[in-house]
Amino acid sequence: MGEVAEKLERFKVPSVDHILGTPFKVLDSGHVRLIDYMGGDESIVQAARVSYGKGTKKVHEDRGLIRYLMRHHHTTPFEMCEIKLHVRVPMDHWRQWIRHRTANVNEYSTRYSEAIDDTAKTAPDKWRLQSGRNKQGSSGYADVENCGKYLTETEAELHRLLRQEYERRLSLGIAKEQARKDLSLSTYTEAYWKVDLHNLLHFLRLRMDEHAQEEIRSYATTIGEEIVRRWVPITWEAFRDYRMDSLSLTRLDIELIRFKDSIPAMMTAARAFGWLERNEEGNLKANREREEFEVKAMRLGLSTPWVTT
Amino acid sequence: MGEVAEKLERFKVPSVDHILGTPFKVLDSGHVRLIDYMGGDESIVQAARVSYGKGTKKVHEDRGLIRYLMRHHHTTPFEMCEIKLHVRVPMDHWRQWIRHRTANVNEYSTRYSEAIDDTAKTAPDKWRLQSGRNKQGSSGYADVENCGKYLTETEAELHRLLRQEYERRLSLGIAKEQARKDLSLSTYTEAYWKVDLHNLLHFLRLRMDEHAQEEIRSYATTIGEEIVRRWVPITWEAFRDYRMDSLSLTRLDIELIRFKDSIPAMMTAARAFGWLERNEEGNLKANREREEFEVKAMRLGLSTPWVTT
Amino acid sequence: MGEVAEKLERFKVPSVDHILGTPFKVLDSGHVRLIDYMGGDESIVQAARVSYGKGTKKVHEDRGLIRYLMRHHHTTPFEMCEIKLHVRVPMDHWRQWIRHRTANVNEYSTRYSEAIDDTAKTAPDKWRLQSGRNKQGSSGYADVENCGKYLTETEAELHRLLRQEYERRLSLGIAKEQARKDLSLSTYTEAYWKVDLHNLLHFLRLRMDEHAQEEIRSYATTIGEEIVRRWVPITWEAFRDYRMDSLSLTRLDIELIRFKDSIPAMMTAARAFGWLERNEEGNLKANREREEFEVKAMRLGLSTPWVTT
Amino acid sequence: MGEVAEKLERFKVPSVDHILGTPFKVLDSGHVRLIDYMGGDESIVQAARVSYGKGTKKVHEDRGLIRYLMRHHHTTPFEMCEIKLHVRVPMDHWRQWIRHRTANVNEYSTRYSEAIDDTAKTAPDKWRLQSGRNKQGSSGYADVENCGKYLTETEAELHRLLRQEYERRLSLGIAKEQARKDLSLSTYTEAYWKVDLHNLLHFLRLRMDEHAQEEIRSYATTIGEEIVRRWVPITWEAFRDYRMDSLSLTRLDIELIRFKDSIPAMMTAARAFGWLERNEEGNLKANREREEFEVKAMRLGLSTPWVTT
């Protein structure tokens, strides 16, 4: 590492430079915009190689090295890249967003300035029904004519009332910090959000997941597909292959798969795991871990020998 | 450090044990409760002494050591204490609270459960007026008869409407994660909040400050005076002496104070700092840094030679 | 959550209380000791349930809930437990240890006190040979008679010389902060180390791994098996089942396994992945990703259709 | 904030671009090099203004705003700037360096590669004597002829021996991860270190301090004076004025200063603080807090009424 004295140019990624400042629309009037970035695929490689010293350039080429680092959770080289976004997002989803603690944040202050006069509105065909299976999810949409139109109209009326009261308080001289107390969670806020690539991918892993709430999933998907994919294409591909589209097998799953050629052995093992208890009608009781295995087995093209009903 | 093998009891602080689980009321129906703690004044000393090896016990006695550590910002021994609270707080102030990133949090989920049916209400005599000087502060109260009563009634009506709409959405089968979008920021939430003593004191330093918003200041003061003071009394005293009641002098402040016996020298210096510019009417222009110095000088019993008007 | 006002006792885990303060030996004269803890399996459940509100107690029993949280990476409830250890460890491995940034640390200061007069010595039969395959690993031991005895003797002589020089510097009045500059990395240091359970498990996941260096693996295994297993037995079991003994399949692995009943389809896919390139002698080129798949397939009892040589 | 759609250029700081890649020498063969940066003084302003919404541009001009943010510890806008350095530093000081946990790090791996063949050598006139007053400090230099020359020669011999043994181990096939165990703490390592500006200034505040060890102070000073000063000149000036050259008065200090015109009142207060206890010979006992006050009083041009001896 003696040959360090060469003159450096700042590292640039032309494929992402042309979208700097461009807002990508999310929801009815939210957005994400790339403000600045540091590093890229090449600087991940550069950082990884400081660990390995001279002469490693020949061993791995760049793509192979990045994929190796991702596969083996060598996270520090990904931390060498940083991104800064400007986002406009309803407060409700911003609440979820900033639970990710390893980022830098500057949010629009409603103590200092008037709250943004904009709320996220739900279209008549976008009212989601409570999922029966998943206590924290949704599934399908409410009927537009009987329900959606009505809810959307009522919502518009509520938003109008809330804003009117907010502005009345201000006009009566009430402090902004207190007047805002009855803004609705659907009110838009704005922020600068800066995060390193490792922590960004962790955020995307959780928030692009099918169990994430639809609204924040839209933000995460936009960040991933519109910005990260252009910024660090090799890393993005590895992230898809090894994180988003991967599958984790537990010790129990592995045991069962090893027995895949013997139905009795598989049944014995599943019974020992407590997966095959039956209720009084003789149907299998609900068991989260067994059901998760069934989904994995299906993805792997394996069959499960038990009969659910 | 060879004599380490002695049997340990868990470290206990009897003076705080009797309030474990007791809710201390904040606002109209919020609270903070102590759930558990690790360590205390003595374990700060114990941790500090691992740095100093054997035989230092004689050099400092405990109180002196803790005060020394606090005065000199030796923060790691304070990190050896941990506290876990259960809090009930309006979402609006919880938003401010969790901007402190170095804590562990489990919040009540309104995706999973129905939102808590309780909102922070403002009494007719508690509507604060916007501060003229401080763009993000408040100052004084609105007139009760002409304004406060009316605002409180309207607020109650708004809260009723919002809850009614929330429950209507649920009764129509809308998913909880979406139905909540128009809850108001004054809706109560609950959380477990766990933090180490160093970061807790940092939180209290900022949130007990007179510039903090009144509501979160109430929470911070309750945590400090009701819980921390009982838990780590020596640390609390040092924190008051060296943080809350301290005063920071800038390079410019120091220069001026050195000239305190010569009005001309003081005036020359202040002028060089750009603090004494006058507007067309001949009055001193507003200058934040000069005004802050004036406040400090008053606290120190020093006079400033310039005439403001 | 209205019924919160009951009196609390501090949460205790009797199964771990009897080892408080007991040093568990690691290496030749290192150790780990439990100093204090906050929470346990039950407080993970308690924290998780604040998210779910009333009435969920029936849905999951405790073990099922903890296992569900672990399987689905719901990490915040595990952060509600905290542990404090006293460790004695060679500086070389402490360097690796404190790369884990999410912990609180108080280390013995060699600026303030004389360095601990103890070094980690390698027995004649414990000199490990460089692994040929793994550039950062070891494999097997050097011959005791021809090599190990000699290295151990030379090492003892080196340690003696280094200590002698250190003490000579001190006796000549040289500052401790400078005299220590030629201590060897094998010199023992001591520290208090405090961390939450989630981050501790992450540390153990990485440092109990077979690719971790043997010395730090000994520390991690001792912490896991002697302390964590006693402290949070249900969590420990879930951690073994879902982290230590789990297996992650990539998008590519999944595709291959889906083709397991058709050798030609498997070969075509593997070729498309670039896994089956051959060198001039007709042997398969080294390919990390293919080799990792071979190991996974073996664990799953699946066969791979290609011939390596 | 509706006018966001304009095309952005990446933010550049020409005054620092010309030193990208240039190594600034520290110690005998260490260095720091700027690799990349994100943001600058202007982006601190930009981030601060997102909090304040439109129209604030007129209120503060940039310099005033940055100084205000620094004076009032509004830290988040400074977190919006990020810097990446390449450093070459002895392991001993690197140990101190990475105790700062809020940075990203990729260090040269001596498991993977041969240790760097270079150690920090101390010149005959640079052996520092132990401070009598400050148990963790140094004060003055050892005599060159009687002591320094001898220590430098012995050190060179030690370094030669240690390297020889390291290389012998490698030549006998011992794993690099184990062979390194007797490298001395003075061995150089290298790393990429990436940190945001707020945390960098915190690092510099502690490590440029006169109580920091001389070696790491050299690194910190070089980073500050050669790199940060060029990168964010307005922030650097504010940092000097409000952090490095500031002075903190405790509650006790303030009370005393208020009494500065009355010697009896000052004496009474100091006595109440326990600052004026005398030993059997009638001399004032050592008291850290009083001594610290004496230093502050001197800086402020105030006199203290007590007689030390």
Image: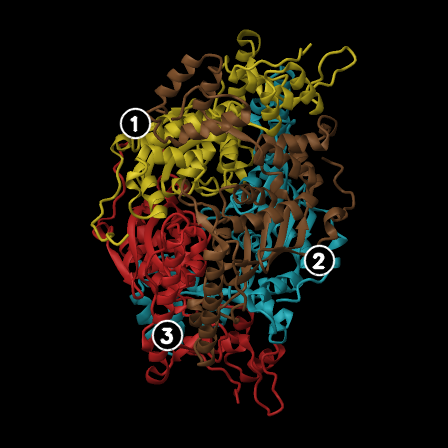
Chain colours: A red, B brown, C cyan, D yellow
Residue D164 in view here = no
* Pair 1/2: label in front: 1
Which mark is drawn over residue C11?
Answer: 2
> Which residue appears farthest toward the top when viewing the image?
D145
Residue A153 falls in image quadrant: bottom left
- Chain letter of disc 2? C
- Chain letter of disc 1? B
Which residue occupies 59% across, 28% down?
Answer: D250
Viewport quadrant of the N terminus of chain C: bottom right
Viewport quadrant of the C terminus of chain C: bottom left
Relative to B239, residue C229 above or below: below
The amino acid type, in three-letter code, at marker 3 is Thr
Dot 1 crowding, Cα within 10 Å, few <14, some 14–19, many 20+: few
Q: Which residue is mark 1?
A: B281
Q: Determine the CA span between mark 1 and mark 2.
A: 69 Å
Which mark is drawn over residue A154?
Answer: 3
Along the line of sight, which residue is nearer the eye, A37 or B285? Answer: B285
Q: Position of residue B285 (x, y in %)?
A: 34, 29
The amino acid type, in three-letter code, at marker 1 is Glu
Which residue occupies 33% across, 84% down?
Answer: A145
Along the line of sight, which residue is nearer the eye, D116 or B225? Answer: B225
Along the line of sight, which residue is nearer the eye, A167 or A7? Answer: A167
Q: Is residue B23 left or right of residue B101?
A: right
Instruction: Report whether mark 1 lies on the same chain as mark 2.
Output: no
Q: Position of residue B44 (x, y in %)?
A: 67, 39
Disc 2, SS: loop
Q: Position of residue C153 (x, y in %)?
A: 63, 32
